[in-house]
Amino acid sequence: MLKFAAVAGAVLVLLVSWRPSPGTAIPIFSHQYDVSCSKCHAVIPHLNEFGAAFMASGYRIPGVKPGPAFPISAKANLVDSSENQGDGENGAGLPKAIVDEVELFTAGGLGSRASYLVEQYAVDGGQHGLLRDGWVIDRLNPWDAKIPLQVQAGSFTLPLPVDPETFRETYAGYTAYTTPVGTNPFTFFDPKIGARLQIGDPLKGLNVQFFGGQGHDRQSGLTTIGTDVMFSAQDNIGPLALTAFRYSGTRPVAAGELDSFQRTGYGVVFDQWGRLSLENVLINGNDTDCGIGGACQSSGGFTQLRYAITRRLFALGRYEGTMDPVNGFTRDGVLLLGYGPSERSRITIEDVIAHTPQTTHTMNIQYTIAY
């Protein structure tokens, strides 16, 4: 572990101190299309309206051929917390201040309408990282078609009303996305391997999405069983986006026992890419056998308000809770203040207020830099 920490620290020092020439100092997409980072982002990683449209088009500008770019971009995230870090008890031995993430990615266009992206964590949570995204997406019909059609294949984040990881601004994850039910390891946080069909523009009017993929959760140690499926429908009415989705699959939860489960969710999002945004997600779960001796029901959700005080200074507040037969009712809140000293960096200070059952405060300070 000490050797790994030393290597991670050396990588971080290299990323922070590196001063490449202007031709290679900008991330892949801004170089490909000869624009600044602020074209797509407010304070990284938060997207503006143009950035959301760029992402919805498969990280392409319709009708514009991307130019060549330095093949790899990187992002590093440092965290200093009032609690030890890691997945195990007492932070699994990790200190309070860690190199939280070192992320590498490459992307580009394929032909006139397709593109690819690979997002690899060299470090994740202060430990060895895994592949996050590795996919190819293809626009099946012309860019000016009235009803856009896209198909995506590979490893990617599920189509949710609020992104669980890449564009999350708090260090604390969304508990409704990260909390498993009983011994069923499924969560909405991890990416899935499969294929996704999208019909319609995800930012205008009605669009529907279908996902099918492996019935498996990485790092669970469990075998793959069957095919997971997900259906999502979203209607955009001006600045308001209304979403409904359903995910179902099967997991082994004990010797010879299987859990057939469903997760049904709803999202109400107002002006997600604007100055004042409000995001609400509710998820209900049903399991035939979640590993505790019978069927069980669960629920979770969050409401999150973000306000851009200035172009570089913003505040965020979130309240969330979960309920399941193992953990009971848990709730917490997050208060965050963030500032972007440059287009490619960000500093945030957050207080995570948990009630499980006593009230506790966890302070997290993040510094994020991308090249």
Image (cartoon, rainbow, N blue to C red):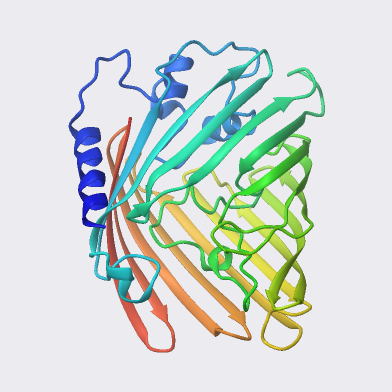
**Residue at (43, 23) in percent of width and height:** 28
**Left or right of 166 in this view: 58:** right
The answer to which of 342 and 102 lies nearer the viewer is 102
**Left or right of 98 in this view: 205:** right
Q: Where 106 falls versus 299 (above or below)?
A: above
Counting from the top left corner in percent of width and height, residue 190 is at 56, 55
Q: So how many labels did they put on this image?
A: 0
**Residue at (40, 25) in percent of width and height:** 72
Query: What is the residue that sits farthest to the front in this orientation?
Result: 255
Figure quadrant of residue 183: bottom right
Figure quadrant of residue 96: bottom left
Counting from the top left corner in percent of width and height, residue 85 is at 31, 65
**Residue at (75, 80) in percent of width and height:** 289
Q: Quadrant of the N terminus?
A: bottom left
Q: Where 4 falls versus 363 (above or below)?
A: above
Q: Where 208 falls versus 111 (above or below)?
A: below
Counting from the top left corner in percent of width and height, residue 93 is at 27, 69
Counting from the top left corner in percent of width and height, residue 356 is at 44, 85
The answer to which of 236 and 244 lies nearer the viewer is 244
**Residue at (58, 11) in percent of width and height:** 65
**Left or right of 341 in this view: 54:** right
